[in-house]
Amino acid sequence: KAGVTQTPRYLIKTRGQQVTLSCSPISGHRSVSWYQQTPGQGLQFLFEYFSETQRNKGNFPGRFSGRQFSNSRSEMNVSTLELGDSALYLCASSLAGASYNEQFFGPGTRLTVL
Amino acid sequence: AQTVTQSQPEMSVQEAETVTLSCTYDTSESDYYLFWYKQPPSRQMILVIRQEAYKQQNATENRFSVNFQKAAKSFSLKISDSQLGDAAMYFCAYRIYFGNEKLTFGTGTRLTIIP
């Protein structure tokens, strides 16, 4: 079974631009969560999508948004990029059933904002 | 709000020796999960071990075991017989028992294995 994939793996943008990152979960997984990882702030939760609905959201400005499609693939969008948005963006997927199901992480997308 | 604290930014251990990584957390919930994740350099985050808060027995996975002290809100990871492949960032994480998949992470401990 293929793991969680994220595209692109590396991205360079300039301030003010917008960017879209993609996450393809493991087949059958219905939940996709996004995290931002920086040296200064560590790993911070952005949002979780479950069955195409945002189920939880972290403390990020409205410039960060996401969505999930019917095949569970998810995208996150960052508009009006700032230098501080440079980070490794990780997504994780899980079955998210009634009992415990492990979350599996993708390799991440490294975003550099110049 | 839940918080997770790892007070050891860096640790090192001699190969084949034992090392313990510390983690404390704060929550008002009674049912939750605690995790240790490993992030090797330039590689994917993987789950090392999981503990359910309602279980008094400490979780064990091969060379990895935890010391879970619910009243003290402490959750340490012990790695026995350390191997070179154990070198990585280790993150302690918390998740509520049911309702969403949000993980709250600590700041991580970078573990170096000395040959």
Image: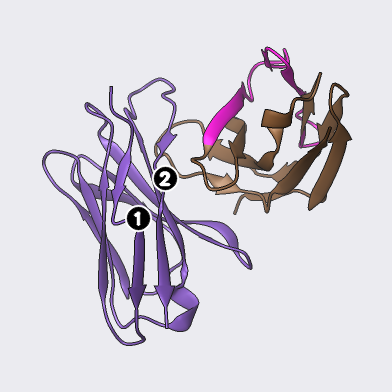
Chain colours: A purple, B brown
Badge 2: residue crowd in 10 Å (few <14, some 14–19, many ≥20): many
Amino acid at the residue labelled 2: Pro
Q: Which segment is the magenta one?
A: B46-75
- What is the number of callouts on the image? 2
Give A53 or B63, whichever is nearer the viewer.
B63
Residue B48: percent from left, percent from top = 60, 27
Magenta region includes residue B57: yes
Residue B87: percent from left, percent from top = 70, 37
Amino acid at the residue labelled 1: Arg
Residue B45: percent from left, percent from top = 52, 39
Badge 1: residue crowd in 10 Å (few <14, some 14–19, many ≥20): some
Give A70 or B13, whichever is nearer the viewer.
B13
Q: Which residue is mark 2?
A: A107
Q: Chain of mark 1?
A: A
| Mark 2 touches mark 1? (CB < 8 Å) | yes
At horizontal 21% and vertical 55% (from top left) the residue drawn is: A67
Q: Secondary structure at mark 2?
A: loop
Residue B94: percent from left, percent from top = 59, 40
Question: In the picture, residue B28 is in which quadrant?
Answer: top right
Magenta region includes residue B28: no
Point out the image quarter for the N terminus of chain B: bottom right
Residue B29 seen in the current view = no
